Image (cartoon, rainbow, N blue to C red):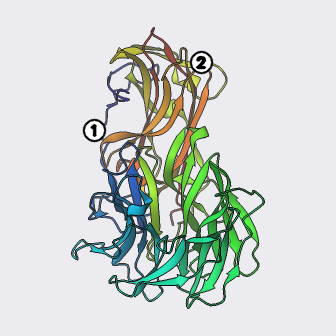
Amino acid sequence: MPAMHGRCLRCWIPGPIVLLAACGGGSSSTPVGGSIAPVELIACRARTDSPFQFAEVALRSSRNLGTRRVADRTGTERHARLHPDGDMVVFARERTPNSPASRDLFVASLDGISPELRLTQDDHADDEPCWSPAGDSILFASDRSGGGALWRIGRDGTALQPFLAPAPGTADSAPDWCHAADRIVFSRRAANGQHSLWLVNGNGTGLVPLTDGGPMLGPGLGDHAPAFAPDGSRVAFVRRIAAEASTLCVVEVATGQVTVRWQPQGEVGTPRWSPAMDRLFFGIREPLRGRAGMRLAAAPVDQGEPALLWPDQRWLLTGLDLAPGMAPLPPAEAPRDLPITGAQVQIASGSGVSGTRAQMAQADGDEYAVQTSTFDQREVAGINCRFDLPVPLAEDVLELRVRAVARSTRGGGDSRLRMSIYNPVDERFDTVVDFAAPDTTARTMEFRTASLRHVTRERQLRFTVVADLAPGTAAQLRIDLVQVELVARTRP
């Protein structure tokens, strides 16, 4: 597929004349912050096109700032967990592509001063580690006993021993250790293949069920990936209801009452509570909304839609943990509409336009059109939109909500409709929404993001809407709506 911005043109848009660099760079592209940012979350991620060769444990702020990472080796890192002291992480690394048996446990320091330490070295799948409250040992899931079970090992790789023997025909996985209550929650697979959550004390006593796995029966369905709230009162988890469908749920430890917090058009994964218990961080995959691949998102604990922290489709979330020093979510103003009529618009690729920006102000069938031009034998047309954000500081931006309704006048083959957002840190446009365009039907492309990595220091948002069509006759990208909402923090 060609680059989305293979041809950058200047054009006149009816209204004030705008000359906007559509390919990045320029005076309005200074990143927010620098390479060093407070480490508030650690996240394992792998490239969708080459997850074995390009994987890392990224160190980021809660707003996706920073460029640091844990020093890594060949392989895909998974399920990193932060030590109680905040100075090191434990994680599993898959050393052979698509081979769970090659997963071993490693410990590494955040600053890279201490050499990486390998804790296990065998032909068994060692995965899903978590630290004990004292930080002197690690609980993890392994198949070394012939089936899935929980094992414990010292932080230096010594004193390996079984922690909990699963009942015959069952298997245990995904432990999480509550440091406040010294209790462990984990997922147990029953003989019929359904998963439910169980609780046990830190010394291995007091085993009791917490959930029943839900109403859907079948291998792999039920409750997975549990995570304690910091105070131990609740557990967030993933309830799988079909092969490629799951919901984000919360269960009260005292009563066992389950609440569905978010049901996406796809899947969720790896939930984690913020230290202030005001947000849930998790992975989200929504192919029906043009977002394949597991991307990092966050949402308020009780209500509200999630916003992407990693909007870029190139990376898959494979593990997550949060630092205790993460700041609470600041108070927010009511969302504000930013009209397209006040934005700067330019052709990103194409040979001409018809219409005015006012035609993109509402979804009424009155469309703005861009003629395609040929690039690498494909027909490509797109617009670049730049919005000035009415906030005193770029850091005041808490969330951006972007929506567009567009279609192409020819589809078929491997034709695509895409929406991308400019990333001044890495100086590229990151694809957020990507739909197949089999015909001329209009598609709604939308996303929410809380990533300051995609806002410039000059308080600007830049994104594109593009039709990338299979080889053939010239066509048009027709845009019926471009809509942006800003959520800013309340200033004193």
Is residue 484 visible in the rendered structure shown here?
A: no
Residue indicated by mark 2: 440
Residue indicated by mark 1: 25
Name which residue type carries label 1. Gly
Q: Locate residue 391 relative to residue 209 in the image: left or right.
A: left
Res. 206 image quadrant: bottom right
Residue 31 placed where, x, y %?
32, 50
Is residue 444 visible in the rendered structure shown here?
A: yes
Name which residue type carries label 2. Thr
Q: Callout 2: helix, strand or loop?
A: loop
Q: Is residue 359 above or below residue 23?
A: above
Res. 422 image quadrant: top left
Q: Locate residue 105 relative to residue 445 in the image: left or right.
A: left
- Seen at 41% across and 74% down, the residue is 82
Q: Locate residue 207 relative to residue 422 in the image: left or right.
A: right
The foreground one among 137 and 444 is: 137
Residue 3 placed where, x, y %?
34, 29
- Seen at 60% across and 51% down, the residue is 267
What's the CA distance linking mark 1 and mark 2?
Answer: 33 Å
**The N terminus sits in image quarter:** top left
Work out whether mark 1 precedes mark 2 in sequence or the reverse, and give the earlier one: 1
- Seen at 43% across and 73% down, the residue is 323
The foreground one among 102 and 107 is: 102
